[in-house]
Image (cartoon, rainbow, N blue to C red):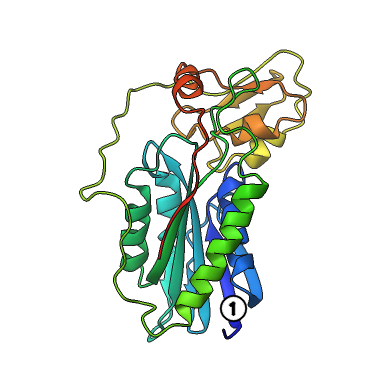
Amino acid sequence: MDILNDITVICFSPTHTSRTIAEAVAAGMNAARIRTVDLTLDRSDSPITVRAGETVVLGAPVYAGRVAPEAVRRLRRIQVAAGASVPAVLTVTYGNRDYEDALIELYDLAVSLGLSPFAAGAFIGEHSYSTPEMPVAEGRPDTLDLADARIFGGECARKLDSSGAFAPFHIKGNRPYKEVKHSGNQTVPETADGCPLCGECARVCPTGAVSIDLNARKVLTDPALCIRCCACVRACPAGLRTYTTPFTAFLHEHCSARRDPETFL
């Protein structure tokens, strides 16, 4: 198998699980060079141009069985250079419930951007709503998940080196995609008393929903901007940032059995 020249990982990953999986897949592909374009904190509109000779690995989280809308918006910045054919591996990461139509939605998005998808995988990451009291896929992706991702990367590289690399392949999912029903829930993560106002929650928020009011000595969260990714909860060094939703109990009760990655080549 020839060594791939360049792999570009392009991801949206508020709690780092989607990036971790995409980079593990890339590592398994035995490329000479790997670079990561992490769009999580990049709210610009500038294009991301990929060129001939690059292979792209996309990474995005699943929200309610679909690709996270903010991930879709940011991945739309990808532009394929004129005349280039750029292969793409698609990865989504979900919180142990189901990825439903997310992977096929990411496939359609990649094609619309001019990429040439030839492999896809759905992997598990700790659910954003997981808590120490009610864990959901706690600690994932773990060492087994990362090993599976690297193995998948090797399979992707071998397929790309074959004559039928871009033949049509099956991906689980439905068109039209699942309709996401919005409950109108405007709850957001909250900060308990005693917060030292270090600003880490604001720094990691991908949408700029979190701010620090030094005069009032409070952490403010804009419900209109918050995407409930819980990056702020995970990042709080004092453990004072929490998000309470009854969905956590449902997930803990019904979605605790270990699920394994599913890959499509």
Q: Locate residue 81: give its quadrant.
A: bottom left
Residue 11: percent from left, percent from top: 53, 56
Question: Is the N terminus in the top left, top right, bottom left or bottom right quadrant?
Answer: bottom right
Helix, strand or loop under label 1: strand
Q: Residue at x 46, y 78 (%)?
A: 160
Near-viewer residue (178 or 119) = 119
Which quadrant would the C terminus be assigned to in this image?
bottom left
x and y percent of residue 248 in the render? 50, 21
Residue drawn at x 35%, y 77% is: 166
Vertical comparison of 173 with 254: above or below: below
Q: Is residue 254 left or right of residue 21?
A: left
Disc tally is: 1
Vertical arrangement, residue 90 with respect to residue 216, above or below: below
Q: Is residue 149 left or right of residue 97?
A: right
Q: Residue at x 44, y 77 (%)?
A: 86
Q: Amino acid at mark 1?
A: Asp
Q: Camera-side residue: 68 or 26?
A: 26
Q: Give the crowd class for mark 1: few <14, some 14-19, many >=20 residues within 10 Å.
A: some
Q: Look at mark 1 in the image and give the residue it sits on.
A: 6
Q: Furthest-top residue in view? A: 193
Instruction: Say whether residue 38 is visible.
Output: no
Q: Tell me the residue at 59%/71% (across/down).
A: 29
